Image: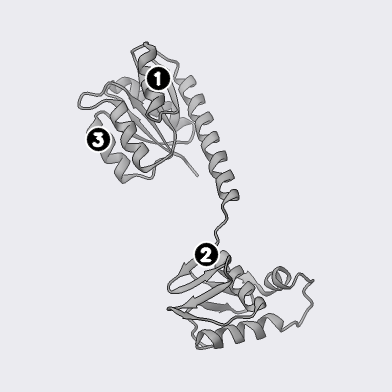
Amino acid sequence: MSAHILVADDEKELADVLELYLTNDGYTVHKCYTGAEALECIARENLDLAILDVMLPDADGFQICKVIRERAYYPVIMLTARTSDGDKIMGLTIGADDYITKPFNPLEVVARVKTQLRRYRLYNSAAKREEPIREYDIRGLEINRDNHKCFLFGRELQLTPIEFSILWYLCERQGIVVPSEELFEAVWGEKFLKNNNTVMAHIGRLREKMGEPSRCPRFIKTVWGVGYTIEK
């Protein structure tokens, strides 16, 4: 999936060059020439990285970086013609991830973009692994793995451990059709044998406890010949 990158610089030729190089590398570029345009883009788009010129005609990159850091953690690379250490320290202090002094080689900028995106994605992946989801709320169906409780529209469902595990597995894969074989092997930890109706029987009991009509259930849907799903 293409990363979305904001390029905010009032030097149009430079912004155009960066757009060309980044686009050639497969990125989607949102080019802005003023601070106001950049702020609109930040509010409107789901960005993955921002490249900000420190000196824009109506704002400076430091102010825009502060706005980004109030709402997001994606990488920010600052561009400037000034070479003082004070500017660099200021940029890094308010949350910028990298600092490039003009003039520069556009290929260097692309390389730094790749480095920052790689670090950001690795960090996010690690954070997701460290903090697995412990609770789901799907249209009034609430299930919590920590206290092993499940509520439907505020009413607690008295589920067996097997029923809870089936429902949790389907919630984890919301929007995906889970084959009966996979569901059985994940919940029971045994190899699935042909003509095993165990999953179907437990799904039936789950639907009864949830007050679900078997022909038109609201939550656990049957995909005939494939398996079961909880739709998004």
Whether tag 1 and tag 2 are in contact, CB under 8 A, the answer is no
* Residue 144 placement, left or right of 72: right
Instruction: Give the numbered dot on residue 220.
Output: none
Crowd band around label 2 with a 10 angstrom C-alpha radius: few (<14), some (14–19), many (20+): some
Above or below for 183 versus 212: above
Instruction: Give the numbered dot on residue 37.
Output: 3
Q: Position of residue 9 (x, y in %)?
A: 30, 25
Q: Position of residue 139 (x, y in %)?
A: 43, 72
The mark that comes first in sequence, 3 or 2, is 3
Q: Position of residue 41 (x, y in %)?
A: 30, 40
What residue would you read off at disc 2? 135
- The answer to whether one can see residue 92 in this image is yes
The three-letter amino acid code for the residue at tag 1 is Ile
Residue at 61% over, 86% down? 204
The three-letter amino acid code for the residue at tag 2 is Glu
Secondary-structure class at tag 2: strand
Secondary-structure class at tag 3: helix
What residue would you read off at disc 1? 89
Whether tag 3 and tag 1 are in contact, CB under 8 A, the answer is no
Residue at 44% over, 38% down? 74
Q: Position of residue 150 (x, y in %)?
A: 53, 75
